[in-house]
Image (cartoon, rainbow, N blue to C red):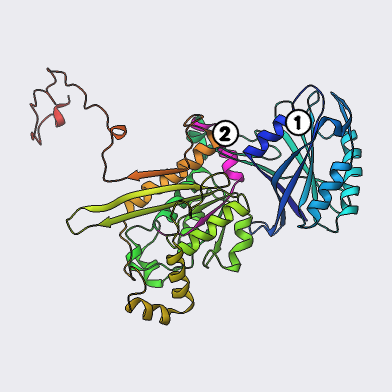
Amino acid sequence: MLRYTFSILDEHYQQLRRSLLRDENEYGALLLCGRSRQIDPWTGVVEERVLVREVIDLPAEAFLERTPTSLIWSTDTLFKLAKRAMTRDYAICIAHSHPAEALFFSERDDTADKESFEIVFGRMDTERPHFAMVMDRTGEFLVRAYDSSVKPHSAELIRIIGDRFQIRYPGRDMIAAPIEFDRQSRTFGARTTEDLAHLRVAIVGCGGTGSAVASLLARCGVSQFLLIDSDRVDITNLNRLHFSTRSDAIARRFKVDVVGDAIAQIGLARSVVRVKQHVDSLECRDALRACDVIFGCTDDHLGRNFLNRMAYFYMIPVIDMGVLIDPNEEGGYDSFDGRVTVVQPGYPCQVCRQLISPQKMLEEGMRRSDHARYEQYRRAGYVAGGNDPSPAVVTFTTEIAAVAVNELLHRLTGFRGSQGHCAERVRRFDWIKDADMVPSGRRNPDCPLCALRKFDGRGDMSPFLNQS
């Protein structure tokens, strides 16, 4: 059994929409797509994910006939694309519009798609599937996969990735929000809660920020979690690692177990997968590729670089965060801020943002693979910094976790408005900005409490608080 899913960047979706919906007649286009195949760790089912890389607009002369309800086109372009796709085992998606009909694959589509994919499979030496799409006049679309026996299978999930994150799945808008999320649904609608329940979300790093993110996401309705962290709880974690206890530190429990057990005890999530490895290990690859969104809560450069590349190769948005508190010798701070960065195709990567240091990656790799050599280099002064941990305070790590989760909520709902997206948000904890301040207000000159100040320091009296 296979699970078929489809991912497209919003820029490609908009291009495709312009191409297919140009007039009142059906029109077609071709998509060249990368592939991703992995075992879904939540279900054990193999997922076949297609990733749109290129939209190929077809000239008008490529079509032999176009009407509001039918389309006949030449196979020449499909032959040429199959030749291109064959060298790298890319997938092909055949797309066309239904400007005058409802959103469904018609019997004519069944026949035409079958004939087209017989050509594709005959031309390409692969058992991997290819895909077909139909789009209605509103821009909504359906996708199905064709396997090597040329049988169709509906895509279980469609993702549109841009300044907003959009997902589509069978039965959307047909399920009422659970009573546990009534207050949230009154804010964002039942659909948002339903969407959150369908997302597969990874949290990489289950320390101060990661544990806070896990708590917030679970209470927002995320139901399927992947927790990745190789570290264990120690005494120094207790001041900021949500859910941790002294007994966890004494037992040296894995952070993913502490956080995973706590999520389960909340009673809202459906499934929590735990991986006790570094994020760039082989054991994490399938699980990460099965995700829809990744929260990067790790402060190591090797892990951040790995997620940085995952975001572009697999079109999986990464919401990365960090807190930097750097006290100086004068009693102040050179840095006292937090950051939330969205990493995805179309946005600057973290290397370009100088959030990843090749030197730090080299040092971290050495520390992992040859710790004795690393210590030798550190004592000799060839390693910058040292083994001292970075300063951290739970209120600030939790605040940045909330900023990151709110970024996901905005991407799903658009609550900040059409221009509310931001690829990077920086919170300066030590600054008082005008935007964070409200007017102090005006006193009523006759107010006995704050203007006449009759009760400053009054303490006990009868009636209590002078309330009758």
The span picked out in magenta is 187-207
> Is 302 within the magenta?
no
Residue placed under numbered mark 1 in the picture: 20
Image mark count: 2
The location of residue 457, given as percent across then percent down, is: 8, 35
Left or right side of 357 for 337: left
Report which quarter residue 456 is drawn in. top left
Q: Looking at the picture, does residue 265 appear above or below residue 52?
A: below
Q: Residue at x 30, y 55 (%)?
A: 325
Cα separation between marks 1 and 2: 31 Å
**Under tag 2, what secondary structure?**
helix
Amino acid type at circle 2 is Ala
Left or right side of 334 for 374: right
Q: Looking at the picture, does residue 189 appear above or below residue 362?
A: above
Residue placed under numbered mark 2 in the picture: 190
Report which quarter residue 55 is drawn in. top right
Crowding around mark 2 (Cα neighbors within 10 Å: few <14, some 14 to 19, many 20+) is: some
**Residue 350 - label:** none
The location of residue 274, given as percent across then percent down, is: 55, 62
**Under tag 1, what secondary structure?**
helix
* Quadrant (top left/top right/bottom left/bottom right) for the C terminus: top left
Choose between 267 and 162: the one closer to the eye. Answer: 162
The location of residue 1, given as percent across then percent down, is: 78, 56
